Image (tube, rainbow, N blue to C red):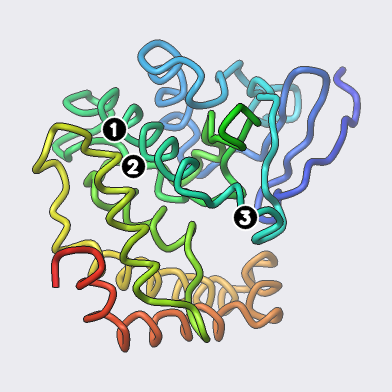
Amino acid sequence: MAGTGETLPGGFVAEVVRIGDTVRRTPPADAAFAAALLRHLAATAPGVAPAYLGTDERGRQVLSHIDGLVPWRDREDAAFFADAALTRLAGLVRAVHDACAGTVLAGGAETVCHRDLSPKNTVYRVGPAGPAPVALLDWDLAGPGRRIEDVAFAGWHWAALGGDADPAELGRRGRLLCDAYEGTAGGLLPRSELVAVMLDQIEDTWRGIDAGADRGEPAMRRLRAAGVVETVRGWHDWLRWHRPTIEAALGTG
């Protein structure tokens, strides 16, 4: 029987434990889809995600452990959010989308989206140009979707929102992500929709936490008690107010 292992940071909703070179996680709601997706990515985009190794005696997902750095604390090092890191991130997302486009996993959608791209779900390694993303973690929410969805999600997770944050900087970073994602293949992303998609995602986030807390889900109750609903609602208001500035910097306003 496997040992108790080392509890890893970031397992706010799911239990995440490292045992040797493996990670054991509470299985997601659609465990079969997640397993099929990770197997597909291992064959078509090696290294972009942990390898799926089955389940253990407790029914937990068994995944390969990926060595590297994960910025658990917000803004712990500006290099994790630098332009070079964003460019590399866009390449990882594009690799996932290209690998899944036109597959059974995507169904009738453009591709399969991660749907939870954030620094805390990203493994970095330090190279000559500084920390660079090398792999994406936590595929529990992955499912069929549009390319623009993951790009938008990354856009507002790798930028400062609310308060005194510079809205033009959010637009600039969104433009950088889109440029790096598309490369020389223009037209993959409907950039004029980027801010609208961000607004929908941010609203879905605070409403989802609120609804989960009302249902008595412990993790969602902890988030609401910590003031996360108010914080994310504030981001939504800020984004709506500054939308013209953001879209002008993005090049779509």
Residue at image mark 2: 113
Among numbered discs 1 and 2, the one appearing first in the sequence: 1
**Residue type at numbered disc 1:** His
Single out the residue that lies furthest toward the left.
187
How far apart marks 3 and 2 lie (CA) works out to: 26 Å
Observer-side mark, 3 or 2, equals 3
Residue at image mark 3: 78
Residue 97's label in the rendered image is 1
Residue placed most toward the observer, 234 or 130:
130
Residue at horizontal 48 percent and vertical 25 percent from the top: 48
Say few, some or many: other residues with alpha carbon within 10 Å of mark 3 (under 14 / 14 to 19 / 20 or more): few
Task: Classify mark 2: helix, strand or loop.
Answer: strand
Asked whether, in this view, residue 106 is left or right of residue 41, the answer is left
Task: Classify mark 1: helix, strand or loop.
Answer: helix
Can you say which quadrant of the picture contains the C terminus? Answer: bottom left
Task: Give the mark count.
Answer: 3
Asked whether, in this view, residue 100 is left or right of residue 65, the answer is left
Please determine whether, in this image, residue 140 is positioned above or below residue 106: below
How far apart marks 1 and 3 lie (CA) works out to: 27 Å
Observer-side mark, 1 or 2, equals 1
Q: Position of residue 184 (x, y in %)?
A: 16, 32
Say few, some or many: other residues with alpha carbon within 10 Å of mark 2 (under 14 / 14 to 19 / 20 or more): many
